[in-house]
Structures are given as structure tokens and as C-alpha cells.
Amino acid sequence: TQLLEQSPQFLSIQEGENLTVYCNSSSVFSSLQWYRQEPGEGPVLLVTVVTGGEVKKLKRLTFQFGDARKDSSLHITAAQPGDTGLYLCARLQGAQKLVFGQGTRLTINP
Amino acid sequence: DAGVIQSPRHEVTEMGQEVTLRCKPISGHNSLFWYRQTMMRGLELLIYFNNNVPIDDSGMPEDRFSAKMPNASFSTLKIQPSEPRDSAVYFCASSFNGNTIYFGEGSWLTVV
């Protein structure tokens, strides 16, 4: 099994601060997905990264895929309380089977 | 547009009872997934269907779990008999041709 390790597991910061969370593995991936899950809801896809070294931006969120396609990071600038949630990375195993990391539980304090 | 619809949202049941969770995928989607989420094990795929046919059920924990998809707009996940360790949030999700997967809001199951 090709595990995805996410760090940190928990992160609590003040509104306005910047943060980075990580998704790492020993295996090469064809692509990687990032999801956000808010309390009481299902995960929602934020972005898919495919190419080594790729950087994608979604407003204040910046996603990067490592050059070797074994790791990815999510950077949030000027965090807001609405960014609170569980951030999950996931990879495809086979055609449609998504395998998730354990997630980073992020809390942004006003 | 309606998303993936799951029922019940919450269920509390006694050990040994049968539990049936229901899912209506997004109209037109041809793949349906059942996931389970716990604090200890995270989000795990139990089974998925493509065009109503089970493709991969390797994540189904044991024979107490079964899933069916009698038509393109309905699926069930059944646990019989239920045990306390089955307590979790069960998510149904759907997609079209392997594209973006959309999750329902989950069914929160507590077995006491």
C-alpha cells in the first residue's frame, strides 16, 4: 500500500497568519488531489495537481506538487476563520479508487 | 442542483441490530462509492460501483457488511449485525466517468 502521510496532524493559528501543510509519500504519483472537509459535511475537491513542480493557486491557497511527484504542499496566506476544516490529500489507486491521507485538522482563531 | 443525498443523517442503534444506509447519487453519474471515516483510520473506501456493478469491494471489512446498487439512482450499505466498532461516518460519493468525485453529507452511525 502506498501511504500518504500528512503533517502536521493538527494546526491551530490566529487569523491573518500564514501556514503550510504537507502530504508526503515514498512513491511517485501520477496525480494528487487536495480536499477540504468542513464539520458535518463531506470532503470537497479543491484542486488536482498532475505535473511535477506544478503550482496552482486558488485565491489565498497555493498548491505545489513536488518535482519528483512524491510530495505536495498547501500554503494558505492570511488565514481566515472560514479556512477552518480538515484538509485531505488523496491519490488514485487504479482507475477510480481514491486513497486518502489522514488529514490536517486546521483551526483558525479569530 | 441536488448533490449526493444520503439517509439517515444520524442513526443510533443497539449492537446486534441491522443498519441500512441509503444513497442517491447525482443524476447522470455512473460511478458510486461508499467510504467510512473514523478518527483512527481516516477516510477509507469500502466499495465502489461502476454502471451499477460492484468493481472493488476489497475495503468491505467483513461479511457483516453488504452493498447493493439495484439501479443507477439508488444504493444501500447494510450492516448486519452491527457492532460498536462500526460506529463511524459513512459517506456515499458519485462521479461521472472517473472525473470529480462528489461526496454526500454522510450518515453518522453510533452503535451502542
Image (spheres, rainbow, N blue to C red):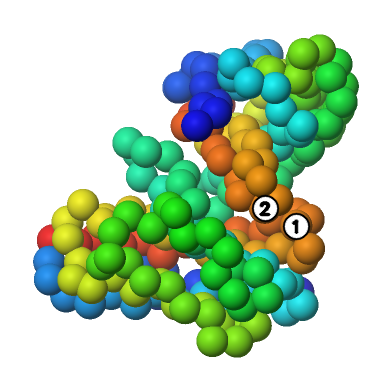
Distance from the alpha carbon under mark 1 to that under mark 2: 6 Å
Labelled disc at residue A96 = 2
Q: Disc 1 designates what residue?
A: B98
Q: Amino acid at mark 1?
A: Gly
1 and 2 marks in contact (CB < 8 Å): yes
Q: Chain of mark 2?
A: A
A23 sits to left or right of A57:
left
Furthest toward the bottom, the residue is B71
Q: Secondary structure at mark 1?
A: loop
Secondary structure of the residue carrying numbered label 2: loop
Residue A108 in which image quadrant: top right
Residue drawn at (12%, 71%), measured in percent from left and top?
A: B16
Residue A21 location in percent, x, y? 61, 18
Where, quadrant-wise, is the C terminus of chain A in this rendering?
A: top right
At which x and y percent is residue B57? Answer: 47, 60
Q: Position of residue B93 (x, y in %)?
A: 59, 62
For disc 1, the chain is B
Q: Quadrant of residue A35?
A: top right
B91 and A77: which is toward the camera: B91
Q: Is residue B33 left or right of residue A34?
A: left
| Image point (66%, 29%), residue name | A80
